[in-house]
Amino acid sequence: MLTANDENNHKVFASRKLNSQRYFCTSCGNPVFIKLGNFKCAHFAHFSNYNCNINNESETNEHIIGKLAISKFLHKNNVFIEKYLPSIKQRPDIMFDDNVVEFQCSSINIKRLNERNDGYSKLKIKYFWILGSKYYQNKFNQSIKKFYTYSIKLGFYILFWDFKSSELIVNYQISMIDGKIIFKEQRFSDWNSFLVFKSKMNFGQFIIRNSLIYSIKKNRKRPIL
């Protein structure tokens, strides 16, 4: 975690400059401590004798630094990192306006993915899943289909984050024709450029032979078209 509450209930960011006062999880309220490792940037962690149902995943350095990088990439004034939403008991990585960004580096099953998406939908929050380097390296794996999004402008598309260049990678117009994946790829250095690109694109008539539409529908509660 990059954030925690101090003894005065003020939200603070993990830093080597913080003093030795006590800190608490912004979600469960249990005590946390700051970790200053040689391989990971400063971050907060729960003590082993405390269990947090919201923050129960071990974070990689890519995920910790990536959240900061993506928040800067958005170029928004009202960006919140790790803002807890008590009504749905979820804490998205990044939130701005009525949008959330989940930067996913670890594996997640379809049940948990749907639960998190349903939570945001209840609050009428639009959600974006941006995937880390391991997903990008295995982007033809069957398990990645659950992250596909469909729009009239881009067709099926999926978002990745380049950890080294701090760029958003968009694979779009994804099709599976006779068992072969076909797609286009574009990179963006800021969020607004992606939105402009998305608004100007015109995918045109959907390819009827695209077998993705049938395989993805099996794992979706709601229709994708």
Image: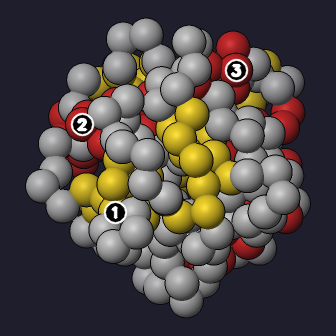
- Label 2 vs label 1: CA separation? 19 Å
Relative to 185, residue 222 above or below: below
User: Along the polypeptide, which appears first: circle 2 or circle 3?
Assistant: 2
Identify the residue shown where x is 82% and y is 26%: 141
Q: Residue 94 at what x, y percent from top left?
A: 41, 54
Helix, strand or loop at mark 3: helix
Q: Which residue matches tag 3?
A: 134
Identify the residue shown where x is 52% and y is 26%: 36
| Snapshot quadrant of residue 198 | top left
Residue type, mark 2 in image:
Lys
The crowd level at tag 1 (other Cα within 10 Å; few <14, some 14-19, many 20+) is some
Looking at the rendering, in which quadrant would you find the C terminus?
bottom right
Q: Which residue matches tag 2?
A: 72
Helix, strand or loop at mark 1: strand
Residue type, mark 1 in image:
Lys
Q: Which residue matches tag 1?
A: 11
Give the number of the disc on residue 101: none
Q: Residue 77 at what x, y percent from top left?
A: 12, 55
